[in-house]
Image: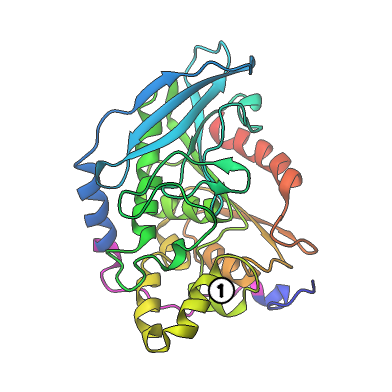
Amino acid sequence: MPQYDLPHDQLLTYRTRATEPEDLASFWDDTLASSRAGWWSPKVEPVESDVTLVDIYDVTFAGFQGEPIKGWYRRPAGVTEDLPVVVRYQGYTGGRGLPHQVGFLPLAGYATLEIDSRGQGSGGGYVGHTADPHGHGPSFLGGFMTRGVLDPADYYFRRLYTDAVLAVDAAASLPGVADDRIAVHGVSQGGGLALAVASLHDRPSAVMADVPFLCDFPRAITLATEGPYLELAGYLASHRDEVDQVLRTLAYFDCALLTPRATAPALFSVALMDTVCPPSSVYAAHNAYAGPTEIHSYPFNDHEGGQFHQEAIQLRWLAERLR
């Protein structure tokens, strides 16, 4: 796959041409306030497993409109002190997985809260356990990009973004968490959710977004040749009279329009041969980000991005901000 997007020197200054809705701030203020009104204390139950180096807990917390969202709370075994926690969001169609699917962060001394994406969780080897009461239980493959896309109030991602924000509230209330040291992290869809949370919540101390999805929709849906953006392009190919209406809805969820509100230090990764999340869409969110940022570019990689190379960078970067 060639580097098909803008030359790298132009990516460094690229900005989205999407237009911010006049009521963007009030839309999200009202959405989050109404869901926080239905907040309840997370339910935390220990899980028996054969993983001896990590303590694992099944967590259920209040998401959009108080609806239950599942997660795994993991922390290094036997550690009693309050720990920094990293809230982790899933890639498209993925779920929180099984208890023993432990990532590298608990092994590095961090607590993690691995949350489900409502209605997703039957793709990529990570099973989900959270239904979307407005649609269905965990489902196979995609279709989420166009659910309710004609009205921002009905759009699937209004619920998903709200769940992601309220996961930070839940993490802060968990036993053994240093609530002044909370980071958010994700890859692809998870990276986009991390950026949305950084833009809509003032608590995160650090943000890690790898090859993030959900950025600069107008450009991404015309460039991507694989992945979820094609759902939107396919929809608009059939519903030719709804282009303006769909783009208006997407603007409320576009991380390139939300990140001017984000101030926590952020670490991005981008792949210049990424056919799922075009590089310019990632740079659109990065270049608009209001807080201090670093971005690591992988010139010859597709949507796999930096993978383990990026994890090594993240471990050093997190230690400087959360320890």
Question: x, y percentage for residue 245?
Answer: 34, 80
Reading the image, the residue beneath label 1 is 220
Identify the image quadrant of residue 286: bottom right
Q: Nearer the viewer, residue 176 or 133?
A: 133
> Would you say 223 lies left or right of 153 here?
right
Helix, strand or loop for disc 1: helix
Quadrant of the image for the C terminus? Answer: top right
Q: Nearer the viewer, residue 252 or 198?
A: 252
Q: Is residue 239 magenta?
A: no
Question: x, y percentage for residue 284?
Answer: 55, 69
> Would you say 236 lies left or right of 134 here?
right
Callout 1 amino acid: Ala
Quadrant of the image for the N terminus? Answer: bottom right
Total residue callouts: 1
Is residue 69 positioned above or below 253 on the image?
A: above
Residue 207 seen by the camera: no
Is residue 156 positioned above or below 12 on the image?
A: above
Residue 257 seen by the camera: yes
Specify the segment rendered in magenta: 11-26
Identify the image quadrant of residue 311: top right
Color encoding of the figure: rainbow
Identify the image quadrant of residue 18: bottom left
> Would you say 253 lies left or right of 206 here?
left
Q: Residues within 10 Å of mark 1 (few under 14, many from 20)?
A: many
Outermost residue toward the bottom in this view: 241
Which residue sits at x=36%, y=67%?
252
Q: Is residue 15 magenta?
A: yes
